[in-house]
Image (tube, rainbow, N blue to C red):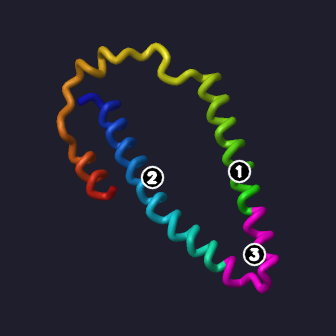
Amino acid sequence: MYFLEWVQVGAETVSTVFLNLVKSLLAPLLVGLIITSIGRASREASVGRIGFWAIVYFEIVTSVALLIGWASMAFFKPGVGLGRVAEAAAVVSPRLSDAMVDALA
């Protein structure tokens, strides 16, 4: 293997493990935050108001993120010019990093 292939394998492994850890930590934190927020609300009206603004915030932030992603895809055009011939010709052998990522998923 060339040096850059080792760097790529290491970067893929680290990024996948990081994303799996974020996924496993983010959901419990958000659920705990929501339960605590609802539990501390003293009136039903404040719960409704908090829920309404949470939904509005979620929709606005999600729409902005989608627009940024769409615009960057349209501007940078990732993957253009890359053929699948080289990918199909490459021999794929199992790697230790793949086994580690699968074990953590």
Q: Amino acid at mark 3?
A: Val
Asked if marks 3 and 2 touch (Cβ < 8 Å), the reply is: no
Mark with earlier residue (3, 1): 3
**In the image, which is nearer the foreground, mark 1 or mark 2?**
1
Tag 1: residue type? Glu
| Residue 89 is inside the magenta segment | no
Q: What residue range appears in magenta?
A: 37-53
Which residue is depicted at the point 28% across and 52% down? 102
Whether the magenta-drawn stretch holds residue 48 is answered as yes
Between the residue at mark 3 and the residue at mark 2, the CA separation in whole angstroms equals: 32 Å
- Circle 2 SS class: helix
Pointers 1 and 2 in contact (CB under 8 A)? no
Task: Say above or below: 89 vs 62.
Answer: above
Quadrant in which the C terminus appears: bottom left
Q: Nearer the viewer, residue 12 or 53?
A: 53
User: Residue 37 placed where, x, y %?
Assistant: 68, 77
* Cα separation between marks 3 and 1: 18 Å
Query: Looking at the rendered structure, which numbered label has been put on residue 19?
Result: 2
Q: Nearer the viewer, mark 3 or mark 2?
A: 3
Q: Quadrant of residue 50?
A: bottom right
Main structural element of the magenta stretch: helix, strand or loop? helix
Using the image, tell me which numbered label, if any, was put on residue 47: 3
Q: Residue at x 21, y 42 (%)?
A: 95
Q: Residue at x 80, y 69 (%)?
A: 49
Q: Amino acid at mark 2?
A: Leu
Q: Do the numbered discs 3 and 1 sit on residues whose CB atoms are within 8 Å? A: no
From the image, tell me which residue sits under label 1: 59
Nearer the observer, 57 or 68: 57
Q: Nearer the viewer, residue 2 or 42?
A: 42
Secondary structure, mark 1, is helix
